[in-house]
Image: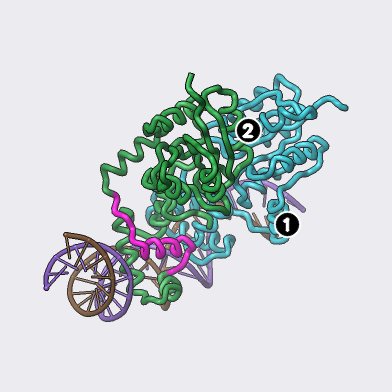
Chain colours: A cyan, B green, C purple, D brown
DNA sequence: ACGGAAGTCAACCGTTCGATTGATGCCGAG
DNA sequence: CTCGGCATCAATCGAACGGTTGACTTCCGT
């Protein structure tokens, strides 16, 4: 028997942390060494403690979000593996997490055994992806998926609040003509042909959030 | 000391059930008698077991959702108290839950002590609402909040997929004129003046879902 | 039986949107 | 340096949208 895997739980929901802790506490091969409610706390813990695997929630209310935290963690000198654990299965979340250096991406409704197995895989440095997650990544790799420029995302965000082209132009201090140009590009990249469709597919892909 | 409160946990996430169980197992005044992954399972349990308080998640993947389950439960002969426990804080969810007979409405990111206290209140038949939840209910009561007709919701749902008036009319086998009339009513009721704004406020109020 | 809410349709009109074409300046990679 | 991507703006034109008014039917509740 080796020494147990040292885990850090990062989630803003006390209940979820409690559930994970219970799941891992009852095994002899894992040891939860700390919990954190957001990314900042997680980094503090890592500065002081040795950890093999971080279980990371994305989208944490208030504090540093999971993707940023993951990026920071994986750029540490001797980074632990980061296993992302979330309820959301949108393209943007998955891609952002993987691109930020996450070792795995599991959904919170996974059965406990899968979670435990994913943690072990992550500790070995292997990639662990939930069933649907892998498929989405493949899709993404097949279609290069034109990425939106920062400005375009900004337009999209305001568009998502129901602004007209004129309001949009005033909000951003640009002409209405420019707004239209951006919109044409956005429509192209999203593969839609009107603003309402743009909003919903943007929400689906996680480019913007429904309620901010 | 009385006999402990008998609890039923209903949530489709094993991790959450585990966390709740851990929280309540360590107290002598509560006893988790069963868990269920959706509404149907919950009803089966209640048919066979005596329960004081049901902790109910809304929005459960696949099975019977929480609101329907709550409605069924509260119409039982001697219903247990239903304490809704969810991550969503939208008007529609809250209202639907309360209207379905929920005794309380708590958010999953609440600290454990509040949850425990809410369970105890629920058992006494008292209403337990999370901090922001109460405020929303008051808002709702102040403004009567014109409710949308079924047809209007249907229009809104399709609108949320980016359809134009023409597509909308073809989809519903009505004339474009009728679609416009419905839209005008929807705009009125939602207090907006264009379709994009209608979509986002509808999503915010939980009338439609972002990703279906 | 009557009133009201809901759903349907029509015609009109001004505004906005979407598409197209073309142009400018900036910046960073090769 | 040059090319491409990004952001900016302009002008045009047909299509779509938003507001308004008015009208007809059905259905429900009092």
Determine which of the numbered discs, if any, sits on residue B25 in the image. Answer: none
Instruction: Residue D8 in the image: state x and y as whole percent.
Output: 48, 53
Q: Position of residue B59 (x, y in %)?
A: 51, 48
Asked if the magenta segment contains residue B49, the reply would be no
Closer-to-camera residue (B54/A63): B54
Q: Is residue B157 magenta?
A: yes
User: Can residue A70 be seen from the camera position used here?
Assistant: yes
Q: CA distance from mark 1 to mark 2?
A: 31 Å
Q: 10 Å neighbourhood of mark 1: few (<14), some, or many (≥20)?
A: few
Left or right: B161 as drawn, with respect to A32: left
Compared across the picture, whether B118 is left or right of A105 comes to: left
Which badge, 1 or 2, comes first in the chain's sequence?
2
Q: Is residue C10 above or below residue A128?
A: below
- The residue positioned 72% from the left and 36% from the top of the image is A82
| Left or right of A76 on screen, residue C11 | left
Residue C17 or residue A11, whichever sits in front: A11
Question: Can residue A165 be spotted in the picture?
Answer: no
Q: Nearer the viewer, residue A39 or D16?
A: A39
Count of residue discs? 2
Vertical placement of B54 versus A9: above or below?
Answer: below
- Mark 1 vs mark 2: in front: 2
Give the secondary structure at mark 2.
Answer: helix
**Residue designated by label 2:** A19
Mark 1, secondary structure of its residue: helix
Residue A31: image location, x then y, percent? 74, 26
Q: Residue at x 71, y 23 (%)?
A: A33
**Which residues are drawn in magenta?**
B145-164
Q: Chain of mark 1?
A: A
Q: On residue A138, which mark appears?
A: 1
Chain bearing mark 2: A
Is there a contact, CB below 8 Å, between mark 1 and mark 2? no
User: Crowding at label 2, few (<14), some or many (≥20) Cα neighbours within 10 Å?
Assistant: many
């Amino acid at each position: 028997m080796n020494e147990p895997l040292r885990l850090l739980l990062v989630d803003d929901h006390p209940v979820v942390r409690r559930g994970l802790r219970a799941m891992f506490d009852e095994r002899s091969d894992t040891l939860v060494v700390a919990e954190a409610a957001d990314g900042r706390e997680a980094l503090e813990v890592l500065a002081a403690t040795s950890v093999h695997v971080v279980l990371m929630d994305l989208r944490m209310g208030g504090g540093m979000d999971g993707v940023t935290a993951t990026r920071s963690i994986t750029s540490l000198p001797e980074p632990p593996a980061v296993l992302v654990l979330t309820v959301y299965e949108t393209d943007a979340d998955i891609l952002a997490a993987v691109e930020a250096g996450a070792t795995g991406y599991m959904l919170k409704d996974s059965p406990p055994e899968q979670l435990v197995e994913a943690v072990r895989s992550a500790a070995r440095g292997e990639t662990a992806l939930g069933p649907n997650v892998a498929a989405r990544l493949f899709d993404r790799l097949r279609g290069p998926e034109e990425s939106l420029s920062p400005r375009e995302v900004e337009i999209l965000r305001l568009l998502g609040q129901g602004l007209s082209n004129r309001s949009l132009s005033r909000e951003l201090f640009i002409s209405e003509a420019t707004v239209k140009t951006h919109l044409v590009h956005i429509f192209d990249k999203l593969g839609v042909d009107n603003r309402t469709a743009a909003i919903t597919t943007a929400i689906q892909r996680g480019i913007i959030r429904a309620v901010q």
